Amino acid sequence: MRRALLVVNAKSRSGEAAAKQIREELEGRGFAVTPLDCDTPDKTSAQIAREGPAYDVIVVGGGDGSMNAAARGVVDAGRPLGIVPTGTANDLARTLDIPADIPEACRIIAEGEVRRIDLGEVNGRLFFNVASIGLSAELAKSLTSEIKQRFGKLGYLITALRVLARARPFRVRISSGDKTCRALTLQVAVGNGRYYGGGNVIEQDADIDDGRLDLYSLEFSRAWRLALMLRSFRAGEHGAWSEVRAMSGHEFEVRTRRPRSVNADGEIVTKTPATFRLLPRAISVIAPPKQPPSEAE
């Protein structure tokens, strides 16, 4: 019988009910399940690192913020991560083709394959999907747990409109290797996975095990122009716009005139100056078998 350590934020919008269902589904598939009693999200990784090595898999139920909070502990424990996406955006699960359906996600944990994937790191803090400065960071600061619990996905739209209404460009210096550029931007984002922001594509051919980070900078002065680019962001084709600077690499340094918040997987984790690094194949996850690219791609 395999042993699973179950980590779910019972104080989230549907956490208590989700924890009960996940436990029942895993036990029905032959797992001995032990819930982890997390004191606070800040202590989650330390608890996982301490208790996780005694288990075969560490199962985390929640959204991208919950996965981010567990990441360091899962790496330190040296056990694979099982993902049950019960959050709002679930971009890590989307990248790995794990459906937002508890029974199906638990089936994948029982029957899927262990995959090594990359992690991003900004100022020592890990991220799966994307870390950003500017619009997304302001959105993360404004999107309170009360808004999430009251409005769900609609809360993102309400908060995003408020952030856009007051958005102003800022000066930034971006360095990678021996290349440095300066710009006036609304946002700098560095992606590790494929999806972010509820299904936007970081870059057209990005994947979470491709061994690179993908950076983009929105270098236009009017936030309303984002509306013209929405389709491009969904497809990862925003780099074709002249106002969008796109770069790929293993490490970036981003500096701003004054310290600005950095958002990683939906959580504010640090401030600029920020150093972004790739950690190749740094963590194991349980996922469906990776599909080879089609001939059309």
Image (spheres, rainbow, N blue to C red):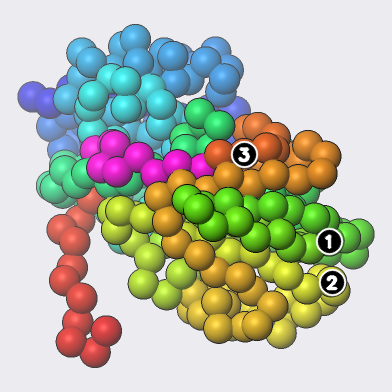
**Residue at 65% across, 32% down:** 270
Q: In whole angstroms, how far apart are the C-alphas of marks 1 and 3?
A: 18 Å
Q: Is residue 165 something one can see in this rendering?
A: yes
Numbered mark located on residue 221 in the image: 2
Relative depth, front residue between 35 and 91: 91
In the rendered structure, which amino acid carries the disc numbered 2? Answer: Ser
* Residue 47, above or below 226: above
**Residue 225: image location, x then y, percent:** 78, 79
In the image, farthest residue toward the right: 166
SS at mark 2? loop
Q: Which residues are magenta?
A: 276-284
In the rendered structure, which amino acid carries the disc numbered 1? Answer: Pro
Numbered mark located on residue 117 in the image: none
**Residue at 29% across, 58% down:** 210
**Residue 82: image location, x then y, percent:** 29, 38
Q: Residues within 10 Å of mark 1 (few under 14, many from 20)?
A: some
> Disc count in the image?
3
Are the two marked residues, 1 and 3, in contact with CB atoms closer than 8 angstroms? no
